[in-house]
Amino acid sequence: ELNPKAVIVIFGATGDLAKRKLFPSIFRLYRNKKIAEEFAVVGVGRRSWSDDEFRSNVKSSISSFQSDSAEADEFASHFHYHSFDVTNPESYLELKGLLDDLDGSYNIPGNRIFYLAMAPEFFGTIAKQLKTQGLTAVQGWSRLVIEKPFGRDLPSANELNDEIREAFSEDQIYRIDHYLGKEMVQNIEVIRFANALFEPLWNNRFISNIQVTSSEVLGVEDRGRYYESSGALRDMVQNHMMQMVALLAMEPPIKLTTDEIRSEKVKVLRAMRPIEGERVEDYFVRGQYDQGLIDGKQLPGYREENNVDQESNTETYAAGKIMIDNFRWAGVPFYIRTGKRMETKSTKIVVEFKDIPMNLYYNSQEKENKHPNLLVIHIQPDEGITLHLNAKKTEGGAYTKPIRLGFWNNSVDTFNTPEAYEKLIDDCMRGDATNFTHWDEVALSWSFVDKISKIWEKEKAVFPNYASGSMGPREADELLEKDGFHWWPVT
Ligand code: BG6
């Protein structure tokens, strides 16, 4: 189905995100006939590029998807470049002229998406100027898409929010959390609420703990400057990890509308036990990568990376125990962990069920505990679900072996599996904000995370404490061991 016609304005069009994610996603929407023949994209950036330079950049970003150069040319012809100075009102007036012209030439009824994919310090300025200079006063709709980071703590997020709210109302603001665009993250709700099997067990009577892991092999790459002021807690936990926990823990919404779903997620975030003061040490663990070997390559430690302080106190790994103090979840720990330079790139959710009341069977002669039932949601790189059960061991009557029932979503033709960004841009064009974060969610998760960063900033850690290529520091294992659990492997 065709989306409404709109001009998409990308601020930061010469940057990495635009090239790696946004142009390819728009191309896929175009090829899948989600956007009309009459559409326009305006790239805005500081560099003085010509339309032609911009278009060849667009073409190179989609070159792996198509080989038909006529199609690429036709697609790229819809792209226009506008070089601008973020603080200069003149620049916005020129942009306005360009947008009005494009509305005319492509027959677009004044619908606009302003996509901020650039340094966050300018988010507020841009939003305000867009309004002051009249760019949002259109016949159709105008929407603001805003990339992370949305602030670096609650006060700065609040300030940013106030600034953008001067120009856009909450329902015009689409705050990106790209994990919400991932196919299997969207599947969490479906697995839970479209099956009779799981929901009756989805509570503290039957689930012993839930583990959410998002590990990366990459280090900080060239983002040392940003990362030094962020760290894993702000970069991954405040947004992606907490969003996954909210989806796992929320009550069934009464309807699948944006407001209903968001309000259930907000309730989860409100029920999270605040981790502050002396409690931080018991509930959260931080790590920083040392040198180490990955795929036969010796890699530098975090403190040796570019733009990183040689005595940096920044965590590249965080693990924690989140308790949701409500009727459904009282007593069930949600363990999360995420880090850079770990053994494998993987995002997985493991739901561990409680033991059966009495053991009739064992899974070895040593009478070890049998294997608990697990439901594993594989988010990436593999997409699927596996259910871990016990079955009879062929050779021994009273012995069991663990078996798995599996479903894999991986399509043979990767072009057909939409990318996270493709889905999110599509949602935004259709005006569906469900898979974007509401301000209340952002505020609550900052307030949770701020209490932890406050302690971590004050107390210097003994870093580095995990080798590149490992699964993180020893303390993260102890975090579960003291509760009688262990991390289930994600490899
Ligand atoms: C981003 C973080 O939000 O998510 C990055 O800023 C991180 O540091 C990335 O690498 C991970 O995303 P994905 O989709 O590769 O798991």
Image: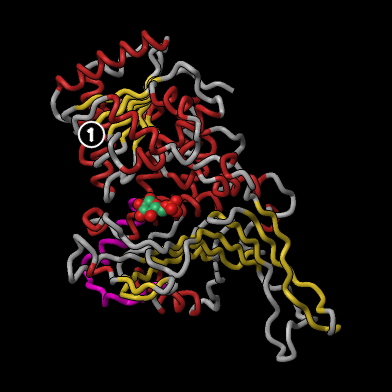
Relative side of 212 to 123, left or right = right
Q: Nearer the viewer, residue 302 or 164?
A: 302
Identified at 35% across, 45% down, the residue is 443
Magenta residue check for 227: no
Count of numbered labels shown in the rendering: 1
Which quadrant holds the C terminus? bottom right
In this orientation, does residue 51 appear?
Answer: yes
Q: Nearer the viewer, residue 240 or 257?
A: 240
Element at badge 1?
A: helix
Identified at 55% across, 71% down, the residue is 489
Q: Nearer the viewer, residue 431 or 74?
A: 74
In this orientation, does residue 455 appear?
Answer: no
The magenta segment is 446-469
Residue 490 rendering spot, x and y as whole percentages: 54, 67
Residue 429 rendering spot, x and y as whole percentages: 46, 26
Q: Quadrant of residue 40?
A: top left
Q: Which residue is mark 1?
A: 124
Vertical arrangement, residue 394 with respect to residue 365, above or below: above
Relative side of 420 to 460, left or right = right
Identified at 53% across, 28% down, the residue is 31
Vertical arrangement, residue 335 with respect to residue 431, above or below: below
Magenta residue check for 458: yes
Relative side of 379 to 23, left or right = right
Which quadrant holds the N terminus? top right
Identified at 50% across, 54% down, the residue is 245
The amino acid at mark 1 is Gly
Vertical arrangement, residue 453 with respect to residue 66, above or below: below
Vertical arrangement, residue 323 with respect to residue 45, above or below: below
Residue found at the far bottom of this picture: 366
Residue 267 rendering spot, x and y as whole percentages: 48, 46
Relative side of 374 to 85, left or right = right
Residue 399 rendering spot, x and y as whole percentages: 79, 82
